[in-house]
Image (tube, helix red, strand yellow):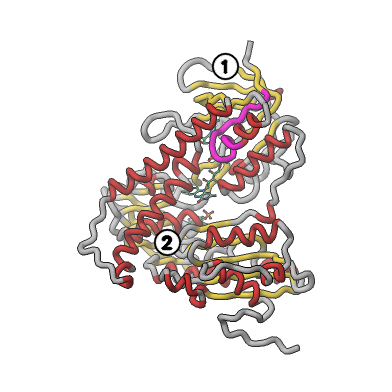
Amino acid sequence: MSEKYDVIVIGGGPGGYVAAIRAAQLGYKTACIEKRINKQGDPALGGTCLNVGCIPSKALLDSSWKYHEAEEAFSDHGIGVGKLNLDLDTMLQRKDKIVLQLTGGIAQLFKANKVDWLQGTGQLKANKQVAFKPLEGDEQTLEAENVVLAAGSVPIDIPVAEVDQQIIVDSTGALEFASVPKKLGVIGAGVIGLELGSVWARLGSQVTVLEAVDTFLPAVDQQIAKEAMKQFTKQGLDIHLGARVTGSKKNKNSVRVTYTDGDGEHEETFDRLIVAVGRRPYTEGLLSQDAGVTLDERNFIYVDNQCRTDVPGVYAIGDLVRGPALAHKAIEEGVMVAEVIAGEHTQVNYDAVPGVIYTHPEVAWVGKTEEEVKESGEPYKTGVVPFAANGRALAAGESAGMVKFVVDEKSDRVLGMHVLGPQASELVQQGVISLEFGASIEDLQLMVFGHPSLSETVHEAALATDYKAIHVAQRRRKK
Ligand code: FAD
Ligand code: AMP
């Protein structure tokens, strides 16, 4: 007889492992099927995010930023470090250690919550049956009252630059360069291209970013995006907009890339090339022909607001479904589906999912951009205050960037918060909370913020929407 579960989750990334733990907390007999083998050759939970995404990239961003500071900024503080030395092996090993610690931690959480980790591949069949092919051994058929599909996403390949993980790499290969490439090309000025380009630029690569679209970070408020472009360019990232890569030819230890822009065709040779042109839902092998689940026109699994697919009792979450491909969105969808299964009132507020780019300065936002609000035709006001007016930012030598609020003129409600600057990923949570609570900008204006703190710029930007900021000169509105 096949084994029966209340909940089977396919995929053990941030969406899947969280769904499994929450389902187990709610008292369900739960299994999570995960097929990943990590670079040490062992089965691993944590998905893209923990193994080859969020966490290792942040470890390298932090290490490379420390190196950059030692090289460029310590002397401003009167600290001399003598001749700086880069031990890339140690830096990469540190990243691997953090990944192992976190992925091992999830295995422990599974044990503590009595989630069965089934190591191997899962496929949804008709009638909520799941074919499970273990890493070793014969295929089994499992049955479940509920199935959660959480298979995530994989990098998009482009035929003009085929990834070999040696010279032309995707985001995973870009976490593993054995030495710092002298000349590094990056295709795509999205979040991943900018983060990984920054890591290697700080460690000494000469980095060129080729981006097909003419607008820099089109999803980001353009006042913030323009300033970010300036800052990144100042840091040495050579960003070409409107530059579409049309071909590449590999040599023994380099790659010649052809791209076209407004001026015609160009060629450039790089030692290494990162392809970072986006990710696509990973549906290969996930669904049998009669599974009954519908895909949308972009191959995402079609779901409603609460992540129900077209098959009752089958849910899909995370990068497999519509919405931003972000770990925290996957996590909250994981919690939501477990609670939907339990019949609880639950939801994800898709209007208040923050976005972050972990460059330096960081870029973070939540809610609507000024462009979006302008297009809606509704009257609005904005408040923008630079970190250059913040004592804490100056003390830390982190005065680039600004905080911006976009506010509904009529209701005074906060519509969006946009940050370029130090700790933007943390500061933006104040915008998340404001949106979630339906705060008016006056609420933020009347709050007391600790001094000196970066958050004071959030306060000042809130005040600036009504020409009340103290530490910037604002032209008073005529009554
Ligand atoms: P995944 O994390 O992709 O996990 C899915 C898992 O399912 C995988 O481990 C896969 O092996 C497994 N699987 C697939 N099919 C099957 C099957 N048939 N049977 C068994 N197992 C299967 N997001 C952020 O929010 N912040 C960041 O800073 C950030 N940085 C990133 C940096 C990089 C370099 C990359 C590549 C991504 C980054 N992301 C970041 C995005 C984030 O990693 C994803 O949004 C997140 O991992 C999605 O979670 P998920 O659970 O949907 O899928
Ligand atoms: P994201 O989806 O945020 O990861 O960003 C990926 C970026 O890659 C997008 O901005 C695309 O415009 C860009 N892109 C896709 N294909 C190409 C190409 N052939 N040449 C240059 N940029 C590209």
Residue 225 in view, yes or no: yes
Vertical relation: 49 (above or below) 386: above
Using a 10 Å C-alpha cutoff, classify the residue at mark 1 as few (fewer than 14 neighbours), some (14 to 19) or many (20 or more): some
For residue 70, what is the image quadrant?
bottom left
Foreground residue among 390 and 476: 390
The residue sitting at the top extreme is: 1
Amino acid found under the numbered disc labelled 1: Gln
Using a 10 Å C-alpha cutoff, classify the residue at mark 2 as few (fewer than 14 neighbours), some (14 to 19) or many (20 or more): many
Residue 246 in view, yes or no: no
For residue 478, what is the image quadrant?
bottom right
Residue under pointer 2: 209
Q: Residue at x 67, y 68 (%)?
A: 444
Residue under pointer 1: 140
Q: Percent position (x, y) of residue 95?
A: 37, 45
Amino acid found under the numbered disc labelled 2: Val
- Dot 2 and dot 1 residues touching (CB under 8 Å): no
Between the C-alphas of marks 2 and 1, the distance is: 47 Å
Foreground residue among 257 and 301: 301
Vertical relation: 83 (above or below) 143: below
The residue sitting at the right extreme is: 410
For residue 414, what is the image quadrant?
bottom right
Foreground residue among 183 and 11: 11
Q: Is residue 14 magenta?
A: yes
The region drawn magenta spans 6-18
